[in-house]
Image (cartoon, rainbow, N blue to C red):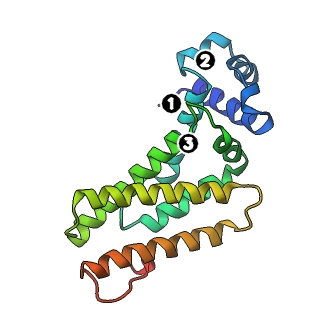
Amino acid sequence: MISQTKFKIANATKHLVVSQPFDHISVTSIMEAAQLRRQTFYDYFHDKYDVLDWIYTVEINEAVKYCNTYRYWPQTLLKMMTYFEENREFYQKVIEIDEQNAPEKVITNHIRQMVGNIFIDLSKKEQLPINTDYCSFLQELLSRTLLSELKRFLRPDSHLNLHDEVANLRDYLDDGINGLLLRTRRIDSYRHSQSL
């Protein structure tokens, strides 16, 4: 069970990130907002970047739990993008952080792992004869593409709503998966993800 104190620190951090530049946020300001002693922070986190990493990891895992497989990849995509939409203001600020410990690395690694899990599951389900190097290539390419599109979607000047964004991503991924399945002769005709 996760400590309530940890949640208080995380929530205070989220509120501060939305309301002021990240470089103005300190451990002291976080703990003042959480109404806790400054020293308590170090019982739970190393630094303010660690808090951001923890927020993303805990919240995204809760948002997409039980659907990180090939069979449920459309649900995974929808839940992931819904999470970012619901936390849009926070992640607009987080994605802008361009420092050594920036949370983008945690987000990138999560997306890479999620894509990898789905491809491993797809390979087993369809008994795909793909070599490991190509799987790694696809995993890297798709995770970078999804991160790039996520950043574009989060920008304040983005004009796509959540529904249209998810529909476009779903079609893009459907096209890629179908191309792979058609090329390896696992299917004879295009198969929409709704029918999986």
Disc 1: CA contacts within 10 A as few (<14), some (14-19) or many (>=20): few
Where residue 17 appears, as percent x and y from the top left, is 72, 35
Query: Residue 20 vs residue 38: left or right?
Result: right
Where residue 94 appears, as percent x and y from the top left, is 65, 41
Q: Quadrant of residue 183?
A: bottom left
Q: Which residue is identified by label 1?
A: 2
Q: Which mark is residue 169?
A: none
Residue 24 seen by the camera: yes
Q: Which mark is residue 41?
A: 2
When the figure is inspected, residue 193 is found, relative to residue 63, above or below; the finding is below
Identity of the amino acid at label 2?
Phe
Q: The residue tagged with tag 1: helix, strand or loop?
A: loop
Q: Quadrant of residue 21?
A: top right
Tell me how far mark 1 sits from mark 2, CA to CA: 15 Å
Identity of the amino acid at label 1?
Ile
Tell me how far mark 1 sits from mark 3, CA to CA: 24 Å
Tell me how far mark 2 sits from mark 3, CA to CA: 22 Å
Q: Which mark is residue 104?
A: 3
When the figure is inspected, residue 94 is found, relative to residue 87, above or below; the finding is above
